[in-house]
Amino acid sequence: MLNRIKYEFISLLRNKIVVFWLMGFPVILGTLFFVAFGNLADSEQDYADIPIAVIKKTEPPEGFEEMLTALSESASEEKALFNIVTEEENKAKELMEKGELQGIIYVDGDISLTVPKGAGIKSGIVKSVLDSFKSRYEIISAAAASNPDKVPQIIKEMEKETSYIRSESNSANYDPYVQYFYNLLAMSGLFGSMMGMYCAINHQANLSALGARVEVSPVSKFGDILSSLIATLLIHNVFLNIASVYLAYVLGIKFGVPFWVIVTVNFLSSVLGNSFGCFIGSVGGMKDGIKNAILLTCSLGLCFLSGLMFGGMRLFIEESFPLFNRINPAALIVDCFYSLCVYGSYEKLFSNIVVLLIWCALMLTGSMIMTRKRKYKSI
């Protein structure tokens, strides 16, 4: 069996088309994703040095300037939250139109905020800071008017930063674009179906000349198919893990899960992809090209529905037809990464793995039934 595995391994390596689709294509597409999403993700998550303008038409409330100064000065290890670009109204409006400001703070008897069109999270941060200051200022002003003696105590209590959230250190990645890389690994796993297809074709006399020779050979057909599947799984996992190492350590993609989880899920997706291809390859007498087209269409279709081309697709399916996400192999593979990354839930990870194993068992059983020994009137 070892000799058969070795020669099957060598034969697969010589198939340049398969090598490209299983290793070259994921690397190229991953690089394109990185170029397309990298800078966009960084710009959305960088919440320091938010550019604002402050226009003072009247004397600001007590403590307001101290607050702005504190938030505009960088600490020893952290950047400042705000970057006050200008205090001139005309220049501020001009910069706002160019999209170079996240807000203009007006001090004119009251404190107000003007934000640009299509304001995002950064403008929301500026508004939250101002709302917090105004609410605290009103509380202190009311206390000063009714009971001045309690003002120092109120200020002291406000200075205490009480947190009701426990912070735990983990490697979670909340970047919304990381799901595209999860889908990329899912697609790479399902692309193993092309190798699995040839395992079936090369062991059936009515599908290939090699299959005819295998049918009349004295070797065990089950052992021969098993050798081919082991060889395809080995080479496919090597390709998958090379692509994963490239994404994680060369491009620096933070998957938010331990690398052993990536390797484990890669192995399962490889088994599923190869068994799916073996099943399709053993069905009917269609030509290789037609079966390849079916496999590519199914693989890309399932990945599309799990969010490869449109990130919100999996959420849309979850809202409209959640059962499909529970049986879609691509969505299950993505959820293995996503649930552990975001929620730290190994329970969800294991439940997804169980469903993937069921799919693998069904496909392998169907493949073995379809490729069993047969009798032919003529070949």
Image: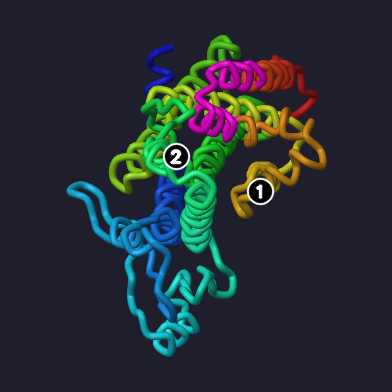
Rendered residue at 43%/34% (across/down): 172
How far is the residue under mark 2 from the one under mark 1?
A: 62 Å
Rendered residue at 43%/58% (across/down): 32
Residue 150's mark? 2
Q: Amino acid at mark 2?
A: Lys
Q: Which is nearer the eye, 343 or 106?
A: 106
Q: Residue furthest bottom?
A: 90
Q: Which is nearer the eye, 201 or 120?
A: 120
Local SS, label 2: helix
Rendered residue at 47%/71% (across/down): 103
Image quadrant occupied by the C terminus: top right
- The percent position of residue 171, horizontal first and vertical second, equals 38, 32
Q: Which residues are magenta?
A: 333-355
- The percent position of residue 110, horizontal first and vertical second, equals 52, 70
Rendered residue at 56%/67% (across/down): 119
Name above or below for residue 367 compared with residue 41.
above
- The percent position of residue 225, horizontal first and vertical second, equals 56, 19
Q: Residue furthest left?
A: 76
Q: Amino acid at mark 1?
A: Phe
Residue 206 placement: quadrant: top right
- The percent position of residue 333, horizontal first and vertical second, equals 58, 31
- Residue indicated by mark 1: 304
The reply to whether residue 212 is visible in this rendering is no
| Of pointers 2 and 1, the one earlier in the residue sequence | 2
Q: Which is nearer the eye, 140 or 333?
A: 140
Local SS, label 1: helix
Does 1 lie within the magenta span? no
Name above or below for residue 199 compared with residue 4.
below
